[in-house]
Amino acid sequence: MDPRIREHAQTVVDHSLDLSAGDDLVIRLPAEAEEFAVALHEIAGDRGANPIYLNNSSRARRAYLRAREDDFETPDHHLALNEAADAFVISRGGHNATEQSDVPPDTTAGFNRANKPVQEARLEADWCLTQFPTTDRAQLAGMSTEAYENFVYDAVSLDWDEQREFQSQMVEILDDAREVRIRSGDETDVTMSVAGNETINDYGRANLPGGEVFTAPVRDSVNGTVHFDLPLYRQGREIEHARVRFEDGRVVSFSAERNEDVLAGVFDTDENARYLGELGIGMNRAIDQFTYNMLFDEKMGDTVHMAVGSAYPATVGEENVVNESAEHVDMIVDMSDDSVIEVDGDVVQRDGEFVFE
Amino acid sequence: MDPRIREHAQTVVDHSLDLSAGDDLVIRLPAEAEEFAVALHEIAGDRGANPIYLNNSSRARRAYLRAREDDFETPDHHLALNEAADAFVISRGGHNATEQSDVPPDTTAGFNRANKPVQEARLEADWCLTQFPTTDRAQLAGMSTEAYENFVYDAVSLDWDEQREFQSQMVEILDDAREVRIRSGDETDVTMSVAGNETINDYGRANLPGGEVFTAPVRDSVNGTVHFDLPLYRQGREIEHARVRFEDGRVVSFSAERNEDVLAGVFDTDENARYLGELGIGMNRAIDQFTYNMLFDEKMGDTVHMAVGSAYPATVGEENVVNESAEHVDMIVDMSDDSVIEVDGDVVQRDGEFVFE
């Protein structure tokens, strides 16, 4: 086994989770990540935790979604599992990122709605989402397998204390902020209030790699247009050049140059899928290239991302409303050129470089 | 996909289980059986059931068992899952049947004790244990992969109505029986009462392939010696030529020519692991060779098997005691030569041939 796989598992358990003896742990990985599963079971055993091992298979999921014709139901057994669990490790890294490309978006949206309580139970526990490097994901990134393995293991093994310190500068700025304005190129100019909301310093806990700070926009305060110029994969399909117009928080119009229907499916999942749940600012300088993988892309140091759909409750202050939705879809704006982030009128990042760097 | 994989999944759902719309289904397979998982998800979707997919990885299990040093606990999350589930499909067919050969038998026994409630919750639901043919299991059987695939798919696609009819003749004999005596060669001569207990006709439901009838011996009635001349795999180790002496139901002495310590570990799991929980008579003529796989071997038409440990509650009459144990270990006697099964003094099988064949 590549020794970095064991190190990765140790980082998950020792840094990302608060795993204790007696904890009931859910390990949910694609089959391709078997060596990572072995390492996680080894360390779970060492710490006296109790693992259950779920197979996160996009092929099986696709077959199920396409075959099901009636309405989806909340699976009581999966809900019971998640409610009883103390901690979750979930990894990406299966074969074929486009596996669900021939599932109708409405079907996936219906499945997500029915499984919202299952997701929520997981989000209330201690959890970490991470990545196993596979040949398929290397191909998606346009990289050799070895270079991609290096990329993933370098990104997850950052000095997270140092990264936390670096990011805390941005947390301080946003915690005191009222209004954030993001401008990029000719098309993106959006303002939103973050007054009263909390900013989270993501230094590799819920996401490994971490490397962003994020908060929730005040639900009805978002106004302007955004051209999400970096693509994203959703339900196995690549959405390119999404353009979205917000009025009083709500998405009032949108387009995409590819797979617009998938984007429409997201917005139609429920009413709150048309509101932003998250504003995130990428700050991880170790992630130096775009790999078509949101877990990494959104952490890049010269990007911002906004997610439509659910807000993380911890980011929403007592006086504001938590946007609840079965969706949470991150979309990215490249801020490396002709771009500026302003907080209460002060520039905090220009062309990808923070003022405190 | 080999069309027999979909047919196999349909047999599981339509014949082995009573799956209905809305049922919460647990699919627990080794990663190697991904195509079977895809087929099962497809049919689960078609029937309106809700699947959760567990990875039955012996490598991960081994890593966990070896690393854990304190006492095992019952995992509440796995118990909650199993208690909430309506149906289970479990498949064998991972890589390397000897994967757990370097786990101390005491460790596995401790794990089994802690997980007994999890197992019991599954046994109370609707369940089916079946097989996916892998190269490793073909090798274990000493067969080419193609020949082994044919063997497995022929065995699971039997005409189960016809098989049920054939086996019902043996069920009638045992249901009226008081004493069963099994003699084979110079070493095996054992008697046991089955009075008051029920005989189950296994025509491919809880086990696919099926092809046996089985009952429970009256707990304290077993007397004599048995030479289990066909080997079995237990915890990744091959136990060969187990010889066991019973007095008033209890195992009072035993030996094995290979891995005797594993057998000792079974008997030491708990007191009732020293008593028989099952007497089974193989009746499946489609299984015409020994493949070192209990799911098939015990169904062979000229074998009997006895399991130490837990009895199936459905086989135990109201006036008799259900033997409860964390173990259930089947062991086989070859009855093809110099062997006889007698029921209340009447020969019902001689040298592997039933009197009614």
Image (spheres, coloured by chain):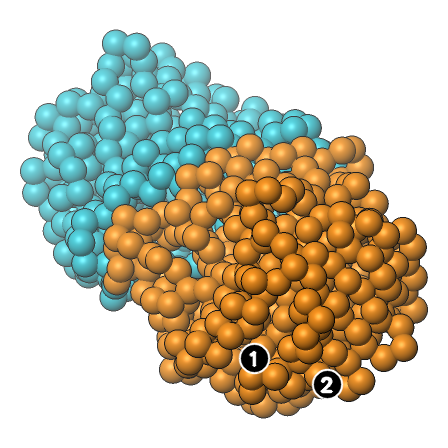
Chain colours: A orange, B cyan
- Answer with left or right where residue B357 lies relative to residue A161: right
At label 1, counting other C-alpha atoms closer than 10 Å, the crowd grade (few under 14, some 14-19, many 20 or more) is: many
State the SS at label 1. loop
Q: Residue at x 72, y 85 (%)?
A: A351
- Answer with left or right where residue B127 lies relative to residue B276: right
Residue type of the residue flagged with mark 1:
Asn
Q: Quadrant of residue B188?
A: top left
> What residue is disc 1 on?
A284
Q: Is residue A150 visible?
A: yes
Q: Toward the viewer: A283 or B166?
A: A283
> What residue is disc 2 on?
A351
- Asked if marks 2 and 1 fall on the same chain, the answer is yes
- Answer with left or right where residue A193 lies relative to residue A317: right
Q: Residue at x 43, y 53 (%)?
A: A126
Name of the residue lying farthest toward the front:
A345
Q: Toward the viewer: A261 or A204?
A: A204
Q: Where is residue B332 shown, x and y percent of the image? A: 31, 44
Q: Where is residue B110 shown, x and y percent of the image? A: 21, 47
**Residue A254 position (above or below residue B351):** below
**Residue A283 position (above or below residue A357):** above
Q: Quadrant of residue B13?
A: top right
- Chain letter of mark 1 equals A
Using the numbered discs, state the Cα–Cα distance from disc 2 to disc 1 in whole angstroms. Answer: 15 Å
